[in-house]
Every structure is written in C-alpha cells, then in structure tokens.
Amino acid sequence: MTNARLSTRPANLAWLILIVSLAPTVGLGIGRFAYSLVLPDMRDSLSWSYSSAGFMNTINAAGYLAGALIAAAVAKRFGLVASARWSTAAAVVSLALCALTGNFVVLSFARLLVGVAAAIGFVAGGALAATIAQSQPERSNFLLSLFYAGPGIGILTSGLIAPFVLQYFGAGSWWIVWWAMTLLGIVLTVPMFVARFDIAASGPRTARGRFAIRPAIIFLAAYFLFGAGYIAYMTFMIAYVRDGGGGAAAQSAFWSLIGLSAFVTPWVWRRTLDLDRGGLSMTIILGVNAIGAAMPLLGHSPWLLGLSALVFGVAFFAVVASTTAFVRFNYPAEAWPTAIAAMTISFGIGQTLGPIVVGAITDAMGSLSYALNVSAAMLAVGAILSAFQRPLPRATA
C-alpha cells in the first residue's frame, strides 16, 4: 500500500476495481472453476467415481467456508489490500500443487487450500471494491459489478486454454493443464502487487461492525440454496457437454460463453440492483439463473447449450453482486467485511454440501441429468424464498 492519493475519476476507479477483481479471477474463476474443465480427464485417468470427483469440489468448498469464517479477522489484522494480494498468491501455489501429483490426498489438500485463499480474497476484495465504489455513489452499483466480473475473466481465459491443451496432449494430460493454469494465475496476480492503492481505500483495520443474522435469515437461506444449486451446474456441465458428443471446441465455447457473460453483467443488472433494498433484485436475478440451469434438460443442441451458458452466466455473477448491494444498503460501512463474510459463509455451506450430494445422486441414478434437475430446482426455490426478504432498518442491522 502507499499513501498516494486515489483519484476519484470514474475511469481510475473502474480500473482499480478491475485490478482488485483479479483476486476472484484467480481464486474462483481459475482456482475453483477450471477444475470442471479437467474433471472428465482426471476422472478417467485416476479412475474416480462421480462421488470422488464431487468430493474434490466439496473439499474446495469446505476450504472456502473455512476461509470465509476467518476472512474478517484476517482483513482486520492485515488490511484489505494485503489480504487480497497474499490470498491470491496462495491460490497460485495451490494450482501448482494440483499439477505435481495424482495422489488423492495431496489433490484434496490443494483444493482445500485454494478454497481458503479464494474466500479470503473474495471477502477482502469485495469489501475493498465496495469502499472504492463509494467514491462515486451514483455509479456504485455499476462499479461494484466490475469486481464480480473477476470470476468471469478466469472462466473465459481458462476456457480458451484448457480444452485445447487436453486435445493437443491427449488423454492423461490433466496435469499439464494445471501447469498452464498456474502460469496464467501468475500473470494475473502480478497487477495486484504492482497497483498503487490509497491507504484510505484499504478499509478500516479496526472495524467492529456487527452483523445480526436473524433480520437477514431469509436472504442468507436463499444464498445458501444458490451456493448448493449453482455448483452442480458448474461442476458437471463440461462432462455433460462431452457426454453429448462435444469435443474440445464445444467445451471451450460453452465455458467461454459463461465467462463472456460476466462482462455484460454490469450493464444488464445495474437498474435491477436498485429496485429495492430487500430481496427483490436477488429474486429476479436468481430466477433467471435457474432458467439457464434448466435449459440443458431440454436437449444437447449446441444452440440450446450455448444459450444456457449465456443465460446462466449473466445471472450467476449478478447474484453475488446482489448480496453485496444488500449489505451496502442495509449495513454501515464498518460492518461490511463482517456482513460480506456472513453471506460468504452461508454460500459456502451450500456449495460444500452441493457437489458430494449431487455426485452421489448421479452415481446412484446413472445420469448427469439428475444433477442438473437438482441444481435448477434449488436455484428456483432460492429465487422464491428471497422475495420474502424485506429491507432492514439500520438500527436493526
């Protein structure tokens, strides 16, 4: 960090938030989601069941949950900027570990590590982005949406690389993909360490804002269902595309469309995020997300799968943005790190349970269609539930 003044010009703020977004780019977009791209080859090469494959995302989600539990304390101790930077560096280390061995225990540890790192980077980065966005209140939702484009950048770049690396090197080359992801992670982490942040934008080091669970319990429950529902789609859709005859180009196109959709999210949803300060915006966005998740159940048509990726992706990133908007609207600034961490914990519990449960259902029923059914249903229920969340009086919060 530096004591240099942070310019409040919109272009500078947008650029700074995009740099902060590289934390979830590496921790989530690559660290978590690139696993889906190599899952089919890892499952075949290492003789995993769907339950074993799902466990790798479960242990990752457990790490994410653990990271969310300690994220506010870490940010308080080290500051938001340092927490975002070094958690992202830890995520890169975990990518290298995935490339080194096929040992189930070591891979599990690597997936756990990247989960912890991603959560700290997401909470610290989200609070930092929210603080920076406050410099332009009239554009804060748009600016904040730029942060949530971060995972999309990771999904897009990994989608343009991983399938073709697998195609070029052939079956059993999953570990080469992890090396490619490690190099990509290094390149994307460098700007975070080079960028100059105003010390005022790093957030309060001694913030003691409190987050009351009961007034927001409906919103937390809806976010839990989102965490449990989206992960099945993101974990198994590449396998679904491959099982339907999709080669490297089809897999890359599908995954890249999800990533590309992140870049239109700020423009598509900025007015929706302002509709009210309760759960209405999440209801609309999560409902669209559920529709996207359900589309593959209608068939394997390339056009249908492509539309599914776009609809799912454009809503997926906005759901997360709606939670931070809810926090900003309903809690004082000093409570933001704690409140965002609480949201992340609820989300983390859902995505911890989702992969292993859905993987077990798939093993038992013998078809990935059941996984997608469960995914879409949980997202739809979450959308309905969030409609009942009302804005919180600041005194209650």
Image: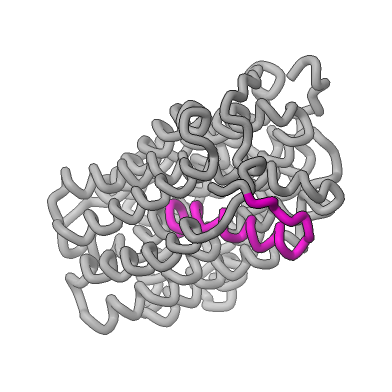
Between 7 and 388, the residue placed more toward the observer is 7
Asked if 141 appears above or below 222 in the picture, the reply is: below
State the quadrant of the C terminus.
top right
Q: Position of residue 6 (x, y in %)?
A: 69, 52
The verdict on residue 350 being magenta is no
Q: Position of residue 209 (x, y in %)?
A: 65, 21
Residue at the front extreme, as displayed: 3
Q: Residue at x 30, y 47 (%)?
A: 111
Between 206 and 182, the residue placed more toward the observer is 206
Asked if 208 appears above or below 39 in the picture, the reply is: above
Compared across the picture, whether 290 is left or right of 54 comes to right
Q: Residue at x 31, y 43 (%)?
A: 113
Compared across the picture, whether 92 is left or right of 296 comes to left
Q: Is residue 287 visible?
A: no
Q: Position of residue 223 (x, y in %)?
A: 60, 36
Q: Which residues are magenta?
A: 4-29
The quadrant in which residue 43 appears is bottom left
The verdict on residue 9 being magenta is yes
The quadrant in which residue 125 appears is top right
Q: Residue at x 38, y 39 (%)?
A: 116
Between 134 and 180, the residue placed more toward the observer is 134
Between 163 and 290, the residue placed more toward the observer is 163
Q: Residue at x 71, y 31 (%)?
A: 333
